[in-house]
Image: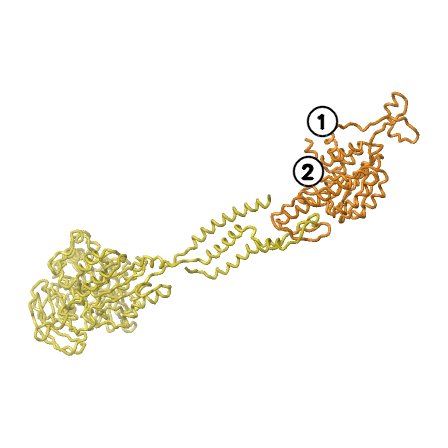
Amino acid sequence: MLQRFLDPLVLSSISSLDLVAKTVVDGFVAGLHRSPTFGFSQEFAEYRQYTEGDDLRHVDWNVYARTERIYLKRFKGETNSQLLVLLDASASMTYGSGKVTKLDYARFMAASLVYLSSQQRDASGLITFDEDVKTYVPPSTRQGQLMRLLHAIEQAEGGMRTDFAKPFVHFQEFLRRRGIVVVLSDFYSDPAEIIKVIEPLRYRGNEVIMFHLLDPQEIAPKFKDPVLLVDVEDDTAMEVSPEYARNEYRDRMGNHRKTLADKSAAAGLEYVFMDTSQPLDVGLRNYLSLRQRRR
Amino acid sequence: MGFLTPWFLAGAAAIGLPVYVHLLRQYRQKPVPFSSLMFFEKRTQSSIKHRRLKYLLLFALRCLVIALLVLAFARPYIRSSTIAKANSAKTFVFAIDNSFSMRQGDRFAKAKQAALDQIGKMGPGDRAQVITFGGPAKLLTDMTSDKQLLRGAIQGIQSGDDASSYAELSRILRSTVESVKNDIDAEVFTDLQKSSLPAAFSDLHLDDGTKLVIHPVTDKTIPNWTVENVDAPRRVFDTKKVRTVATIAGFGTPDAVRKVTLLANGRPIETKSVKIGINGRATVEFLTLDVPYGLTKCEVRLAAENGAASDEFPNDDHWYFSVERADPKPALLVHGENDPSSPLYVRTALESATDAAFTLDSKTPAQATSLDISKYAFVILSDPGPVPQRLEESLEKYVQAGGYMLVSLGRNATPGRNVPATGIPVNQVHTIQPDTETVQTVAHIDTSYPSFGKAQIWDGVTFFQYVKLQTPPESPAVRIAARLANGLPLMVDNRVGEGHVLIFASAFDNIANNLPLQPVWLPFLEQTTHEMGGVGSGQGTYKVGSYVDLRTVKEKNIPVEIVGPDNKRLLTLAESAKAVAFQFPSEGFFDIRRANGREELAAVNADRRESDFALVTPETIDSWKNTGIASSAEVGVTRQGADTTRDENAELWWWVLALLALLAVAESLVGNRQMTAAEK
């Protein structure tokens, strides 16, 4: 049942992104409850007496009704969690051999993560980029933040080519609090360069998760006949034989992924490879396990 | 192999269509967007592999479909000569001339022996047929490989008395080629008489694939005299007044004197010598023919002066003819009381006739009343005026029983009364008024009518008085044989019962017209009386191969009888009851008893064209042979050496279409399968 709800193809039929996120997260969470391997509970930590300047939204009005004392509800995440999603919206992300493109998949992922984060009262933000920063929603726990994020995610469209160097310089300016940084991209660039750009994020105490999204056709292209491929980013065309796609390409793609994984591990970055034909739970599970570690 | 419509082969260019679809069109690829090409490299290998035929089977099927379609339209054929060559069996026709001329010397024996020799040369698979063409061509065997049967057929052939015809031979060869549907070798054994050639060379045309091989039994022309014809009366009434004229002809002969003998029943009556010029003709006249009463077999025979055979071919040195001696038959002439002229003219005319077959009995109507009319051969009423009732009844009865009566009508005719024994009334007796009218002449005569067979010059005959008959209604019983210039009937034949009444609308005197004074009078009356008296009917002399009528339509199931020259009956019982005609097979005398009871002695002679032994020229023979060969070359007959095969175009487009249909189905199946696979 869960599998069905997390299937990207099923999710793509849901027009509203918040509904997608709810479906994914609620289903995923319900599935976790039934699972004995994961202990998961509310992030509630303690009550704290109200002092001036505290946000009234955190007042536990039930306690006030019983005791006539004002207590604030405190959550663990609220104190140390901030989620920033870096969504690659370059042209290459618009590729998809099926109904779901990589960008769609990344949007589902991003929406699910911010929804989950907002459920836990964590501040969450979003940056979409291609060769430059396209959208920036600062992390916040304010009311309506989720809607802002979802709207921004919804608006993310395929843009120009990917250039990690330029936008990531800006990211560092935006990241003032440490937290979790999720990078959703297909990482079509030199692994060393990517790691070199992303690595500084880790220096500030951020936990960085690199979600490497690839279409099945990108992982293992299957051409019966020779095809003329056109790069969606720069419109260069190339004639590709099925034999090449079957053998050499796969080797090179495998090397790329391995290098990326090795280098990210060496840099203390979390690297998660995701096949866009697979359900979304892999991504969520990785995110939550990272949260667990941080606690 | 060839094509009937080869220009359709240009459609083979359409094979370029599948080539384009499979090779060229496939090569132009549709660009496929891809996320990044950073892991791809351009390789020459891929370009080369583009050119590979993707759907090799489908491509092959499509090419074949188009090729077969083009092939079917081009209508391919193969020549069946290939098959004929494979078994190389030949078809022979052995044509043997057994005509009258082949009786000369040992010609016929030579021809048969040559044919037997040719049978011995036949190969194991060869087939042959034996025919004769001495007269109408006869197939003696079917097409067979049985040499024994063929030899038996040849040995059984008898020489005949008929005339050969190379046109007839060509006709039978054409029909043989048509029926066996193969080339034939026509082996012809003949004496190559020029007289056997048809008048038109086109009649000798042979069909394609007919190889004509002529085996002449002689190569020289021999001089030959023959009795070409004899002109003798059919019946003899007065032996002193008979004139027999024999024509003697020489073919390739020098000047010579020959003895010609007239024989009756084998007994010589008179012999005369006659001198015949180079290749000439001469006539011999015999003025008496003393024969006994009844039918007599007569013959004119030709011999050398010393009594020996006149030449090397004695078979044609005679001419058979038959005569019948009888007493003159009585005929009755009834004339008016005061008419002395018509008996005179009629009697004179009858007695002047060559055979004087009738004796005339002239009576007035009153005298004739008491006569037994039935004993007369015919009756002539020459403007008798009113006929007594009793006589009229007698005449009517006579005609009804089959008698003939000639009625001439003149001034004594009574308007309003019927012509005796007929229902045709007399309207008016018209006399020409010289001041206002011109005399009438004969404007139209029916030359097929017996009375006008020989005498057709009626120009000088003028009519001053004639009887206007009421125009008789058109019916088979009434025949108008002659008309006057004003269109009125002059002579009407009215069949009454079994007999006939001939009405002449003017009198036989020199007052109403000048007919009795004109030359046409004698032959007119002679022919008319001969027809009426039954003298003129029947022909005494026939040619071999000609037919004689044995019965009329009315004479069904009445037996007839024919006795041949060898005194054998020639008809079976069934034939004697049903045979309508009989063909004379040979020379000689044939006794014929007809269905009407009359006896006849038919003298049959060979066709005298056979007496001319002049040979066909080699050029003509070559031209004849070439008619078959030249035509067959036009349609592509293959000839190698002596071998001749007949080509027939066996068309193959049916097979091509059938194969095309199968390939189309296969193409659909394969195409569908590959399309489904591609979609998956």
Measured in 3D between alpha carbons, the distance from the residue under mark 2 to the one under mark 1, in whole angstroms, is: 23 Å
Q: x, y percentage for residue B524?
A: 20, 68
Point out residue B442 in the picture as x, y percentages from the top left corner. Answer: 26, 69
Q: Against A149, is B116 above or below?
A: below
Q: Nearer the viewer, residue A104 or B186?
A: A104
Q: Which residue is mark 1?
A: A36
- At label 1, which amino acid type do we have? Pro
- Residue B415 visible to an observer of this rendering: no
Indicate the chain on which mark 2 is placed: A
Can you tell which quarter of the image residue A63 is in? top right
Which chain has been coloured orange in this picture? A
Front residue (pair B320, B372): B320
Q: Secondary structure at mark 1?
A: loop
Instruction: Say the numbered circle drawn on residue A278.
Output: 2
Q: Which tint was used for chain B?
A: yellow
Query: Which residue, as the protein is rendered here, is positioned at the far right?
Result: A52
SS type, badge 2: loop
Q: Is residue B302 above or below residue A295?
A: below
Q: Which quadrant would the N terminus of chain A be assigned to in this image? A: top right
Residue count near mark 2 (Cα–Cα under 10 Å), binned few <14, some 14–19, many ≥20: some
Q: Quadrant of the C terminus of chain A?
A: top right
Along the viewing direction, whichever of A54 and B618 lies nearer the viewer: A54
